[in-house]
Image: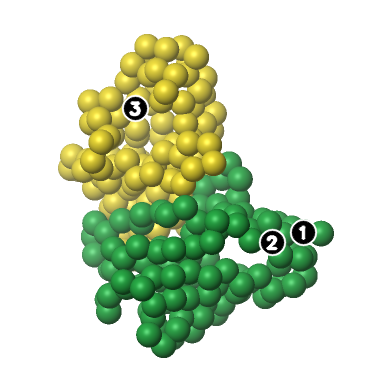
Chain colours: A yellow, B green
Amino acid sequence: GAVVSQHPSRVICKSGTSVKIECRSLDFQATTMFWYRQFPKKSLMLMATSNEGSKATYEQGVEKDKFLINHASLTLSTLTVTSAHPEDSSFYICSARARRSYNEQFFGPGTRLTVL
Amino acid sequence: DAKTTQPTSMDCAEGRAANLPCNHSTISGNEYVYWYRQIHSQGPQYIIHGLKNNETNEMASLIITEDRKSSTLILPHATLRDTAVYYCIVRVYGGATNKLIFGTGTLLAVQP
């Protein structure tokens, strides 16, 4: 099956700093990538959808200036959490949809962000 | 996309079949039923999807009622590694920008 990787898997940072999370589709081209966040014991919440080469579409209530998404190529999307605060601590999961099929969507292993 | 309703949690004995129900009474004709699962602290894993016919793959079977208002995911011989949260999602098949919206899911606990 298709593989989606995320880096780093775990990051701890100080309040006020910015953190970048990378999402890569390793063996397929992804025209669309999605970013989710998940709080403990809660379901995944979709943050934004990004298409390669265009601006991301953010879900209602998600601050686009705080969560910067760049989908620079068909295999890489990045999420930057700017000026992170403790309430941004969460599990961030990316997902990629294969170019060959709009119905196959694969998830990365997630990144655990802890803001001190 | 139509909304789904699932029980919050279920138990199943190891080696027995696990039957996970899902209600999607407002599903429309062009919406498929998808099942994903999430093992603790990992990304979701695709299991199966279907429109109206029953489907089976190496992981599970999907039974969809004739009126399509509900479905059941069946894990034929549950193991301890099947303990996870199982999400039932309905969405339109195809389309460049359609999204997977996760509900609360069912926490399946497989007991030894």
Q: SS of the residue at dot 2? A: strand
In the orientation shown, which residue stands out farthest toward the right? Answer: B112
First-in-chain label (2 vs 1):
2
Quarter of the image holding residue B20? bottom right
- Residue B100 in the image, given as x and y percentages of width and height: 36, 56
Q: Are tags 2 and 1 found on a single chain?
A: yes
Mark 1: secondary structure: strand
Any part of residue B14 in sight: yes
Q: Which chain does the residue under circle 3 lie in?
A: A
The residues tagged by marks 3 and 2 sit, at their Cα atoms, a distance apart of: 39 Å
User: Which residue bears the numbered disc 3?
Assistant: A80
Chain name for mark 2? B
The subunit letter for the residue under badge 1 reads: B
Percent across and percent down for residue B15 are 77, 70
Mark 2 to mark 1 CA distance (whole Å): 7 Å
Is B7 placed above or below B69 here? above
Task: In the rendered view, tell whether residue B92 sits above or below residue A45.
Answer: below
Q: From the viewer's perspective, is residue B25 above or below residue A65?
A: below
Amino acid on which the number 2 mark rests in the picture: Asp
Dot in front, 3 or 2 = 2
Which residue is labeled 2 in the image?
B11
How would you rate the neighbour count of disc 3 (Cα within 10 Å): few for under 14, some for 14-19, many for 20 or more? some
Q: Position of residue B87 (x, y in %)?
A: 49, 59
Query: Is label 1 in contact with label 3 (beta carbons under 8 Å)?
Result: no
**Relative to A38, does residue A51 appear above or below in the rendering?**
below
Q: Residue at x 53, y 37 (%)?
A: A40
- Report helix, strand or loop for mark 3: strand
Residue type, mark 3 in image: Thr
Query: Which residue is depicted at the point 81% across and 59% down?
Result: B112
- Residues indicated by labels 1 and 3 sit on the same polypeptide chain: no
User: How far apart in space, not on screen, are marks 1 and 3 (Cα)?
Assistant: 40 Å
Residue to which mark 1 is pinned: B111
